[in-house]
Amino acid sequence: MSSIKKFQVTIDCADPERVARFWCEVLGYVAPSPPEGFATWDDFNRSLPPEDQGAWFACMDPSGAGPRMYFQRVPEGKVVKNRLHLDVRVGTGLVGEERLATLEAECARLVALGAVRVQLLAADEDNESCMVMQDVEGNEFCLA
């Protein structure tokens, strides 16, 4: 018998808080409260050794339904295409021009937040249209 496990999505990046706050805006997620004993995340970070300050940040679905997202600082920059990406499903159930209009509207909102539009993949006989994008540090994701 199998069981469903909760999981989190971990993303390597240079600036964890910046990338996490971008994804909060994309997904409607929120940053968790700072650790007990700290009024703010800045207070918590100041309590750490300098090399650990800002080393990670997280965000979560306020409803608890979606996975927690964890962003960790790594020394190397992104150099190749992601092996895994997120599909942000904004056009579920929509087809044709209505789907395209929805993708374009969400693309414009995310570009204003710092995302980059890469490519519109037009519908074919097997798939509906989707939009390939990059987050604020160049990680690919799709609007689907």
Image (spheres, rainbow, N blue to C red):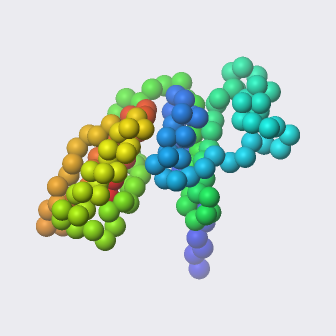
Counting every numbered tag in the picture gives 0
> Closer to the camera, 38 or 71?
38
- What residue lies at 36% left-to-right and 60% top-to-bottom? 90
User: Residue 113: image x %, image y %?
Assistant: 42, 38
Furthest residue in direction bottom, as rendered: 1
30 on left or right of 46: left
136 on left or right of 60: left
> Closer to the camera, 73 or 18?
18
Residue 125 image-quadrant placement: bottom left
Residue 118 image-quadrant placement: top left
**Is residue 95 visible from the viewing direction of this image?**
yes
User: Residue 89: image x %, image y %?
Assistant: 38, 60
- What residue lies at 74% left-to-right and 42% top-to-bottom? 34
User: Residue 14: image x %, image y %?
Assistant: 52, 28
- What residue lies at 41% left-to-right and 52% top-to-bottom? 86
| Image quadrant occupied by the N terminus | bottom right
User: Residue 109: image x %, image y %?
Assistant: 37, 45
Furthest residue in direction right, as rendered: 37
| Image quadrant occupied by the C terminus | bottom left
35 on left or right of 141: right
- What residue lies at 27% left-to-right and 68% top-to-bottom? 94
**Is residue 81 visible from the viewing direction of this image?**
no
Above or below, 66 relative to 71:
below
Above or below, 135 relative to 105:
above
Residue 114 image-quadrant placement: top left
Furthest residue in direction left, as rendered: 125
